[in-house]
Each structure stands twice: as C-alpha cells, then as structure tokens.
Amino acid sequence: MRELSLNVMDVAQNSVRAEADLVKITVIESDRNDLLSITIEDNGCGMTEEQVAQVIDPFFTTRTTRKVGLGVPLFKMSAEQTGGSFSIDSKVGEGTKTTASYIKSHVDMTPLGDINSTIAILIRCNPDIDFVFVHTTDKGSFTLDTRELREVLGDVSLDTPDVIEWINEYLKEQSQIIYGGADI
Amino acid sequence: MKSLAELQAIRDKAKANINLRKENPNAARVYVGMATCGIAAGARPVLNAFIEEIAKRGLQEDITVTQTGCIGICQYEPVVEVEIPGEEKVTYVKMTPERVARVVNDHLVNRNVVTEFTIGAYT
C-alpha cells in the first residue's frame, strides 16, 4: 500500500464485515516522540484466539473468491518494517481492536497519506454504521463522531451529498489546525 | 468553520427534498471493488472520481456509487461494475480516475458501453 490511510480503509472493511455498528479509528502522530500509532476498534462479532492467529497468516481468509487475505498481513508489515509493533485484541461477541505503531523517522515508514479521504469514504459507503475518528498531533487533536452528527440530522442519512460535503470540509479544516495551518 | 448549526440547515434542506431523495428504483449502480487488491491498485481515487463526476452532472438521484469486495480478478483491479436496470452488467478493468468521465458520459448517460475498458478487451 502506498499510504497507511489505505491500510486503514482496508482493515476497517473487516469491521464492517464483522457487523460492527460502531468503529473507532484513532491516529496519533508525534514528531516529538517520533511515533505514529493507528488504532481501529469495533464492536463487531470478534474472533477467537485461534482466528486471531490465522488472520495474521496471509494464506488465511474467510472469503471464498480467492485463497489469500493480505489486508491484515500488509498492515502488520507496514508497522514492523519501521521497527514498530502490531497487535490484535479480540473477543468473540465483543469486538476487535487492531493497533499498529510506527517509528516515524524510519526509512521504511509509509506516509499516512489522505486519511480524511478514507474516513469520508467509510462514512459515505456505510451510512448505517457509526464512526468515531480521533486525530491527534503534537499541536492538537480533533474528533469526528457520526453519532453527534446523527443527533442533529435526525432521519436525514449521513450519505446525503450535502452532509458528505460538510464532513469533507470539517475534516479538512480540523486537519489544517492540528497540522499547524499547513495547506493540505 | 464548519459548525453543527450548518449541519442543521443541511437537514432542513434535505427534509424539504425528502421526496426527491427516495430510493430511485431505476437508478444505475456503480460498484467499485474495494478489497485489499482494489485499494492497493488505486480504487480510492477511482471511487472519488465517480462521486465527483456524478455530483458535477447532478446525477446523484440516477446513479448510486457503492463499494464492493473482491470478485476474484485481482490482476485486473481497479475493477468497476456498472449495472443499469434491464441491461447486462458491464465489468470495467484497470480503471483510472481519467477513465471515469468517459464511463459516466458514454455509458451511464448515453448508454454506450466503453468497450475498450471492459474486461473483454483485456482477455
């Protein structure tokens, strides 16, 4: 994957397929601590210990269209190749938490990329699922919680074009603030 | 600054148009393959290009864009399937954002399949 944001989009898909109705994505970037961490947490069906061991294996997949499942292995590799770490905590019936930590300055660090686009697409394509996105840098932090948006919107769907536009603009503005006014 | 008050205005406007927003049974469907293979091959900019092109032409009520999983032809990703009610499903392969405008204009609007982008042209 060219960007970590693409890994996030891919792995978050697993939460959708696990029938989660709440997915929390947390990105913490710190130049001060030379660290980036990504957490994807859901309240989906969860996995047994054995299944957790299997998803790390590229030749395991629950799908039937092909014989390999590279989503989780690629995400794990992206973290470990920077000297970082990767873990999956899961409980059947409760959900799954996937965490990847990176050493930012490592030569093999993949750029985070357009994480806002990932979040906007996830919301747009799964309007019935709630997403909480928290993005933190050394300069600040912001949260997008679709449950709060839903409260205002009532029965107007999150995938209404004007709402998606609002979400895109909100993410852009907030990112500019936590990146220190840089134009992105 | 984007505020929740602004979102409230969006809601009121959307509610006024609620009848227009009713699911259109004759809407064409665009499925973008967004499994690991599709994403790695560049499906996200393709999906975004479809959304933008359709919004630009004001066709949101007539064309729905959704993501789908892997259909097993990973070597041809990004794969996009176009389904128009009453017509055979068309599979476009090795899609790029640049190719999207042609597919929207020729196929979705004018009902002419862009044969050179279909899987048939590659196999």
Image (cartoon, coloured by chain):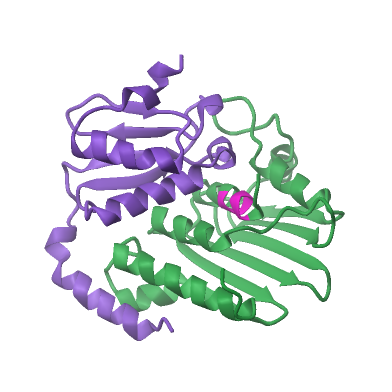
Q: Residue furthest top?
A: B123
Pinpoint residue A171: horizontal percent, then vertical percent: 50, 71
Looking at the colours in the rendered structure, which chain would you say is drawn in green?
A: A
For the image, the number of numbered tags is 0
Pinpoint residue A162: horizontal percent, then vertical percent: 30, 68
Pinpoint residue A54: horizontal percent, then vertical percent: 72, 37
Residue A146, quarter of picture: bottom left
**Magenta segment, which residues?**
A5-9
Residue A45 lies within the magenta run = no
Considering the image in quadrants, where does the N terminus of chain B appear? bottom left
Residue B81, quarter of picture: top left
| Residue B34 vertical placement versus A15 (above, below) | above
Pinpoint residue A159: horizontal percent, then vertical percent: 34, 60
Identify the residue shown where x is 26% and y is 75%: B11
Identify the residue shown where x is 62% and y is 33%: A61
Looking at the colours in the rendered structure, which chain would you say is drawn in purple?
A: B
